[in-house]
Image: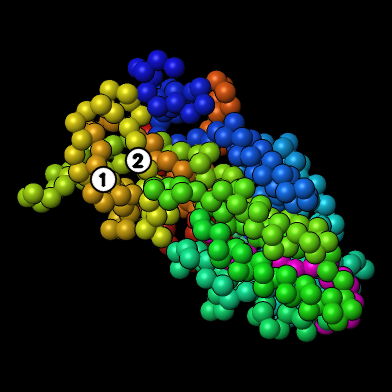
Amino acid sequence: MHAMDGLVLEDVPLNAIADALGTPTWVMSAGTLRARYRRLAAALAATGRPVSIHFAVKANDHLAVLRVLAAEGAGADVVSGGELRRAMMAGIPAARIVFSGVGKTLEEMRCALQAGIAQINVESAEELELLSAVAEAEGLEARVALRINPDVDAGTHAKITTGLATNKFGIPYDRAVELYARAATLPGIRPVGLAMHIGSQIVRMQPYRTAYARLADLVRAIRARGLTVEALDCGGGLGISYRDETEGAPEALAAAIHAELGDLGTRLAIEPGRWLAGPAGVLLSTVILRKTGYDGMPPFLVLDAAMNDLMRPSLYDAWHGIVPLSATTATAPTEQVHVVGPVCESGDTFGHDRTLPHMDAGARVALLDCGAYGMVMSSTYNARPLAAQVMVDGNRWSVIRERQQPEDLWASDRIPDWVEATLLPAGGGL
Ligand SMILES: Cc1ncc(COP(=O)(O)O)c(C=O)c1O
Ligand SMILES: N[C@@H](CCCC[NH3+])C(=O)O
């Protein structure tokens, strides 16, 4: 690729996409998704025991993304009826879908049972009773794994930790054996195993090891009661390198699973989201203007992307790399800037005190590692239409979601007839 083309994703110059579609625009790389899936699958296979991969659909639920992963053989971990339908529409067989989540509605339970999915991960005693009633009423059997909360600190951001006793997720560890025994007596329920997910963006293996060792103890305690444990779902959470972290190595995760759980004779599964999809996506944006800071303070680069598009920095103070698209800009002298969006919140900031090549209005940037928990967490806050989405594969690219039109924003609004109002034609041309 010629240097004048600037930043490329696979073989596609990102400026060509921005020229054609404008910004903000998400771009996903199918090749990266495939390569990461294959590396993970190979690491798991190398342990000699099969471990199935259920992609956590919450990380990126786009049908094209799911389709690429389905073609690689991925199953799915879903947390809502909507995700279940997306996964099935993308061709992921029901037999490779598990349903997690702390509050499944009765309707969602019914749909999951009727679809015949592999397993429902139950997160509370209350949910177990509800599921039993639904399954009995439907004349179906629910294959259930109890999601255990091991009370282990995953060492990640507090808002994405899920395996502490103070978190809402999972069944308290010391109640698990009793509840498993109860599950075995309930109509419509077949307890098949245990599940665990301690958090997200985990880059150290020790929390996994500790949690899996606790899981193994539970398997032994349940079996000592004469009950069967056939399946273990080891959760997701493997982290990536957003800044200077060393990303979680699939080989190390595979070794942890193998060492702690490999000799229990169960089926094994994991539910990764971020590790597969995160590095496969970028968000393209244009500098609207460069605003001078207070005396001596860094200027603000105001982008046309905002927290409504990529929420992670404002929600978790998350770091995303920011790089210029143009090769010429990339070589300009550097300076310190604050990179912000135009939304009316101080939290609408992508980076404080970033050292970047000098950029003026019209310059384009890519926000990196946005393939997981990016587009899926977008909103239309400040009446900002959802951005367009593109997939690249080798040297081809296609729009996989049209940019939302301003009219779509109010298309479902209804004004009650008891509110006196005459709607005026909205100004066009936006
Ligand atoms: C139950 C469950 N499984 C899997 C995942 C996927 O996590 P990650 O994207 O960190 O791999 C999550 C999200 O944290 C989750 O809640
Ligand atoms: N949305 C979070 C991860 C939450 C994972 C879901 N349990 C993030 O962007 O990092």
Q: Residues within 10 Å of mark 1 (few under 14, many from 20)?
A: some
- Write down which quadrant ligand 1 falls in: bottom right
x and y, in percent, of residue 226 in the image: 89, 79
Q: Look at the numbered discs 1 and 2 and tell me whether their residues touch, using CB distance below 8 Å.
A: yes
Foreground: 289 or 159? 159
Colour pattern of the rendering: rainbow
Q: Which residues are magenta?
A: 182-200
The local secondary structure at tag 2 comes to strand
Above or below residue 314? Residue 214 is below
Q: Position of residue 113 (x, y in %)?
A: 83, 62
Q: Hey, which quadrant is residue 236 in on the image?
A: bottom right
Residue 22 on the magenta segment: no
- The image quadrant that residue 221 belongs to is bottom right
Residue at the location (35% across, 17% down)? 4
Answer yes or no: is residue 184 visible.
Answer: no
Residue 354, labelled with which disc? 1
Residue at 62% over, 69% down:
211
Q: Quadrant of residue 101?
A: bottom right
Rendered residue at 77%/48% (across/down): 48
Q: Which mark is residue 233?
A: none
For this rendering, which residue is in front, 344 or 5?
5
In the rendered structure, the answer to whether residue 261 lies left or right of residue 409 reads right
In the image, what residue type sits under mark 1?
A: Arg
Residue 209 in sight in this render: yes
Residue picked out by circle 2: 322
Q: Is 198 within the magenta?
A: yes
Query: In this image, 4 relative to 188: left or right?
Result: left
